[in-house]
Amino acid sequence: MLADISTIIWKESRELFIQRPGFRGGWMGLLIIVGVFGILFPYQSGIEWLSAPTTVLMWAWLPFILVNGVVADSFAGERERHTLETLLASRLSDRSILIGKICSAIAYGWGIALIGMIVGLVTINVSNWAGKILFFPPFIGVTMLSSSFLIAWLAADLGIIVSLKADSVRQAQQTLSVAFLLFFIPLLLLPVLPDNLRISLQNALGNLDFQSVIVALTLILLVFDIGLLVVAFRRFIRPRLVLTEQ
Amino acid sequence: MTGLAIETKNLSREFGLIKALENLSIQVPGGSVFGFLGPNGAGKTTTIRLLLGLLEPTGGSAQVLGYDIKDNPDEIRSNCGALLEHSGIYERLSAENNLEFYGRVWQIPAPERRDRIRELLDNLNLWDRRKEAVSTWSRGMKQKLAMARALFHRPKLLFLDEPTAGLDPASAARLRDDLEKLVEVEGVTVFLNTHNLAEAERLCQQIGIISRGKLVGLGSPGDLRAKAGKPHLEISGSNFSPQMIAELEARPGVISVELHNSRLTIHLQEAVETAPLVSMLVSAGGQVEEVLKTQSSLEEVFLTLINENEGAVE
């Protein structure tokens, strides 16, 4: 099954980067993201960039946005371009197709985030060179790696579930945009909360142990990821997918 | 390949109240080309989907290469190739990468994959354009590539769903030539869905005719013509008057008479003497230049069977 999964990843990566029409399609967007998040922001923030909680948040959410941008195409795109039925008529198992698509989306989002983190580290070391290599504090580093991976996985699961059912890539993207907004509603609501409620919320959060919160959030994310993966497996019903490609 | 490649028994599929396929029972011997003819929406694509294990039947059973379509769909798909209603070609990829992908899907080792890509693209005169994105190709070229993809892993059984539909006559003829050549070289069994009767007549050893989900005719092209077709007389000449036509139509054994561009077509019952008909025409003043007695074409058989079934349904 691993060989089949890697075959799907091989095809998806080629469709995504190598044979997209024109340079601007794939690589230019990637360079801009890495330039902004890996060079501009670290350079502006200085050495604090390595340990600031905003850095963790930024690297956690960046894969969500990146995966969201490509995952809508996974099944809806195949359906729209009339390649889905031929793929389903091949010897590939349901699991290998589904996991291959999910892994491709994760690899894209998380991969770019990792490249950005490494470029950011290089930027910080070059602009603040003090005779020794600077690195993320261990807990921050592990948190950045795990949270960015789990959030990329979450976005991939959600995107695949939506894409499996959507008639077109545009429809999948619209549905995912709504899902994306739902994630930010709590943040958007924060400034409009009554002052006393907001202050007590801030106090409560301030009293929490940062590390325990991160561990708890990581576990919650992991549970969500696995749960959504199970949902995706249940929604991948070959006969139903065949009938949706008309 | 010997034995039966496909055997269905009362295979049926319903979509709600619609009976897309009703009690299909056929046997396709290995190493042959089986043509499945029918108008649009007759149930041809549904049949291929059922035989590939992509849809579950609502009744009956079928074995493909000895595997049951309900119990072993993965084995069936592993041993079959398919060119479905849409070519299924990834247009953003090059021809080489399209074949490379499906070569990997079928777990063909890398060196063999490279050789096979070269062999197939060479055979189809596409090797020089292998690096181009397929989106820039003509429909005929894409269809050829799809054919190469379907044959890539040397399947024992090939499903082709209207492979020449939408192609211009020259491209369709070339694709038929390529198919004939490739089938001959590869020795596979082919299940060919088509509504192109000339294509079926040329390529198929056995033909099934389907209408509104029901099999209405089955046999070799010759058998079908003999069973469902009627003889007719083609008479070229001049001075054929409406009165002569009326007299001909009144003769026993004559079903109908048509006159098109100085050519009389007399549709006959079986075992009718034709010489008296020609004598009658000549004695009534008709100028007869050529007389030809033939069996119905496959097209006429097809239309007769389809019309009979549709008449029965209505």
Image (cartoon, rainbow, N blue to C red):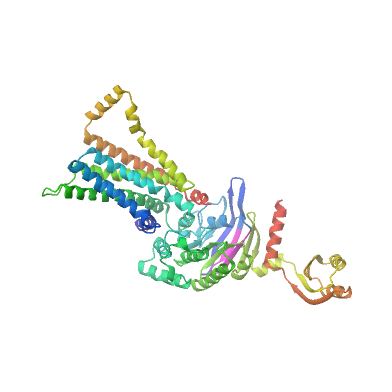
How far across and down, in percent of the image, does residue A158 sit?
Answer: 39, 43
The answer to whether one can see residue B156 in this image is no
Question: Is residue A90 shown left or right of residue B172?
Answer: left
What is the count of numbered marks?
A: 0
How far across and down, in percent of the image, does residue B259 sit?
Answer: 79, 67
The residue positioned farthest toward the bottom in the image shown:
B289
Q: Quadrant of residue B275?
A: bottom right
Query: Which secondary structure type mostly characterizes the magenta part of the structure?
Result: strand
Taking B89 as reference, is B313 above or below it? above
The residue positioned farthest toward the right in the image shown:
B284
Seen from the viewer's position, the closer of residues A198 and A48 is A48
Seen from the viewer's position, the closer of residues A55 and A73 is A55
How far across and down, in percent of the image, does residue B204 sit?
Answer: 60, 68
Question: Is residue B194 shown left or right of residue B312?
Answer: left
Check if residue B26 falls in the magenta segment: yes
The answer to whether one can see residue A99 in this image is yes
Q: Residue at x 38, y 47 (%)?
A: A69
Check if residue A35 falls in the magenta segment: no
Magenta stretch, residue numbers: B25-38
Q: Quadrant of residue A229?
A: top left
How far across and down, in percent of the image, does residue B163 sit?
Answer: 55, 63
